[in-house]
Amino acid sequence: MQHRIKPTKSIIFSSLFFAFSAQANIDVATYLPNLPKGTSVSFIAKNLDTNQIIADYRSQEFMLPASTQKVFTALTAKLVLPEDFKFQTALLTNGETNNGTLNGDLIAKFTGDPTLTTGQLSQLIYQLKQQGINKISGDLVMDTSVFASHDKAAGWVWNDLSICFSSPPAAVNIDNNCFYSNLDASKNAGELITVDTPSAYPVEVVSSAYVVDKSESGYCQLDAVVGHDNHYYIKGCLARQEKPFGLSFAVQEPTVYGAEVIKNNFKRAGIEFNGKVSVANKPQDGKLLSEHYSAPLADLLKKMMKKSDNQIADSLFRTIANQYHKRSATFPLASQTMRSVLKSKAGVDFANSVIVDGSGLSRHNQVSAETMLDTLEVIAKNEEVLHLFDSFPIAGVDGTISGRGSISKEPLAHNLIAKTGALKGVYNLAGFMKNAKGERIAFVQFISGYSTGELESKTKRAPLNQFENSLYMALYGE
C-alpha cells in the first residue's frame, strides 16, 4: 500500500521584493581580515521587520551551499508532502497461506525510510510467524520501485563513499545503510591488521593492511576498497595502535544487503525459505501481511535539520519527486522537481543555480546567498502554516550549533537559529536572529576555501570564531 498525495496545501506567498537600502548598514568587508588569506565569503542579511537589506557582500556569487541545502529540501517537502506523510515498509504476498505454507512470493516493499532499523525489519518477519507462516514456497521480491538509477548523486567525493556519513540513501535503507567493524593494529611492525565484523552484518571485510613504525606512518594511509556484493578490502598501512578501534562503513549494495538481512531473519524466526531473490523496478501489489511506518514528516524534518541528517535529506529529495510525478525518481528528476516546486509555489527562482542533491554533499551544487535568503524569507512569512522554525538548530542549545564557539554565548545564544553547512574548507550558516531592538533578521553566510594551513590542528576554528562573533554581534547591535 502506497501513500497518496493529498491536494497540495493552498499557500499564497507574498511576492519577494528586496527593498535594498541605498547602502547596507554593516560593512562585511571590515571583518574579512579575521579570516585566513584565500578565504572566499558571500554574505547577506535582511531586517524582516523594516524590509531592508542591512548587510550585503557578494551575495549574488555562486557558492557551495553544503548542508544549508537542507533548507531547500525542508521547504519543498512541506509544499509537496502531506503533513501526515510517513515512509512505509511492508511485506505483501501474491499468494495464499495454507497449512503454514505461504504459496506464493513474499514481496518486501521498501520506500526509502531513512530511519528503518534492523529491529523494526525483524519485527515484520516475526509477524509472519505469528500469522502461522512456517514456510515460503515462492521467491523473495524486493520492491525498490520508488527510486531509480544511481543511489549516489553526482559530485559526491569519491573517497568518502565508503564512509558512513555518505552512505547511499537507497529504497532499501537499514540502520542508515551503515555497519561497523573493529580493527586491531596492536601488532608489531610488518604484521597484518586484523578485522572483526559482527556476524549480524551480512558483509565480508578482509584486511591486507599492515602495521608500521611511527616513523613510517606519515607515508601511508588506510583505504577501504569495495568489491561486489558488499565485500570490503582494507588495504594500506597504519601506525601501531594500543587498543582496537571501530570504523564505520557505508553499505554499497543496499538491496543485496536488505535481502540477506531478511533471509537471516527467516532463519531466526524458523521460517523455511529456499526461493530466489529478485528485484522489482515497478510497484508490486499484493495482500498486506505486515507493515511499519516511520515517524511523521515534521519529526523527520526536525531530525534532518537539527542533526544535519544526510540520509533523511536525500531520501526526502527523491521521495518528493516520486510522490509529485508518480514515477520512479532519480536524482536529476528530484532536482528538476525541487526547482519547479519552489519557483511555482514559493517564488524562489534558482535561475542558473545548480541543484544536485537534497543533502548538500555534492560538490556540484552552486547556489547564491541571495537565493537562500529568498527561501528564508518565504519560511518566515509563512511560518504559521509551515512550522519550520522549530526544526532549525538553536545557538548554544541544540543541533549542530549547540557548541559553535562564535555564537554560544548570549546575546547570540538562545537568540540565533541556523542551519549549518560544512564540507572541507566550507563553513556556512543560514537562519534567523533578533537584534537588540527585537527585530527579526534573516541571514546567509557562505564561506569556502577556508584553510589555516600547517597550523590547522591548532588554529582551525579561531579565525572563523572571531569573524562570526564580530559579524553577528554587529547584526545584533544594528
Image (cartoon, helix red, strand yellow):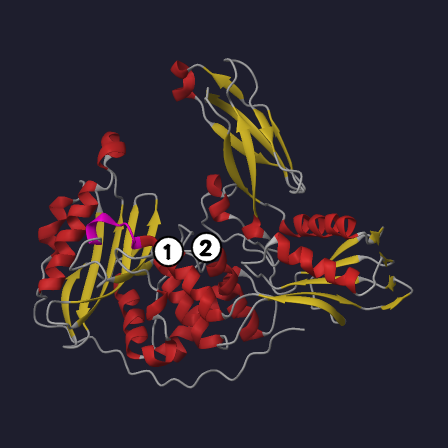
Q: Does the magenta segment cover residue 403?
A: yes
| Quadrant in which residue 9 is drawn | bottom left
Q: Secondary structure at mark 2?
A: helix
Q: Is residue 86 left or right of residue 132?
A: left
Q: Nearer the viewer, residue 245 or 159?
A: 245
**Visible in this render: residue 400?**
yes
Question: Residue most toward the front?
Answer: 130
Q: Position of residue 339 (x, y in %)?
A: 42, 69
Q: Does the magenta segment cover residue 41?
A: no
Q: Which residues are magenta?
A: 401-407
Report the residue marked by disc 2.
Answer: 310
| Position of 399 relative to 391 (above/below) | above
| Position of 94 relative to 454 (above/below) | below
Q: Nearer the viewer, residue 97 or 462?
A: 97
| Position of 406 relative to 394 (above/below) | above
Q: Nearer the viewer, residue 115 or 52?
A: 115
Kindly identify the amino acid type of the residue bearing the numbered disc 2. Asn
Sequence order check: which comes first, mark 2 or mark 1? 1
Please tell me which residue is depicted at 50% across the width and 75% down the height of the picture: 81
How far is disc 2 from disc 1 in space, using C-alphas? 8 Å
Crowd band around label 1 with a 10 angstrom C-alpha radius: few (<14), some (14–19), many (20+):
many
Report the residue marked by disc 1.
Answer: 67
